[in-house]
Image (cartoon, rainbow, N blue to C red):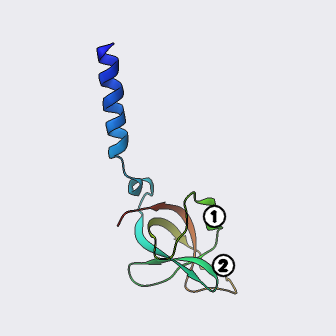
């Protein structure tokens, strides 16, 4: 019984030490901004990305200036009427404490 209790405690501590930033492979820091075209991440270079996919599929509360980690694929084959920068398919997005 004591070994089981130690195992459960260690499992919980390990789970708490995993950060959400690790959930996006090859992720880069970005900041969310609400533009005339909807929510758009701004990467560290200052460039905005125009999301090709619906960002509401990512499960967190959107807020102006929220720091996130994103993984994305640039989509030069897609042209969007409303855009603030290069079109990108956001494949992963998680909150970060920055």
From the top left corner, tell me how far across and down residue 18 is, in percent.
36, 47
The vertical placement of 52 against 23, above or below, is below
Pick the residue in front: 7 or 73: 7
Count of residue discs: 2
Pick the residue in front: 19 or 9: 9
Tag 1, which secondary structure?
Answer: helix
Q: Which residue is mark 1?
A: 56
Tell me what residue is drawn at x 43 percent, y 57 percent. Answer: 25
The vertical placement of 98 against 12, above or below, is below
- In the image, taking residue 54 as reference, residue 40 lies left or right, namely left
Tell me what residue is drawn at x 32 percent, y 29 percent. Answer: 9
From the top left corner, tell me how far across and down residue 98 is, in percent.
35, 67
Residue closest to the far top: 1
Q: CA distance from mark 1 to mark 2?
A: 20 Å
Q: Residues within 10 Å of mark 1 (few under 14, many from 20)?
A: few
The quadrant of the image that shows the N terminus is top left
- In the image, taking residue 41 as reference, residue 67 lies left or right, namely left
Pick the residue in front: 48 or 63: 63
The vertical placement of 88 against 83, above or below, is above
From the top left corner, tell me how far across and down residue 68 is, in percent.
44, 67
Tag on residue 94?
none
Q: Nearer the viewer, mark 1 or mark 2?
A: 1
The vertical placement of 53 against 49, above or below, is above
Q: Which residue is mark 2?
A: 78
Label 1 vs 2, first from the N-terminus: 1
From the top left corner, tell me how far across and down residue 36 is, in percent.
63, 86
Tell me what residue is drawn at x 55 percent, y 63 percent. Answer: 61
Residue closest to the far right: 81
């Amino acid at each position: 019984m004591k070994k089981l209790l130690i195992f459960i405690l260690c499992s919980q501590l390990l789970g708490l030490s995993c950060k959400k930033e690790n959930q996006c492979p090859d992720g880069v820091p970005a900041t969310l901004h609400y533009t005339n075209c909807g929510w758009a991440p701004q990467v560290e270079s200052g460039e905005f990305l125009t999301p090709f996919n619906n960002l509401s599929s990512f499960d967190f509360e959107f807020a102006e200036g929220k720091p996130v980690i994103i993984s994305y694929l640039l989509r030069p084959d897609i042209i969007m009427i409303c855009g603030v920068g290069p079109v990108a398919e956001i494949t992963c997005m998680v909150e970060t404490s920055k």
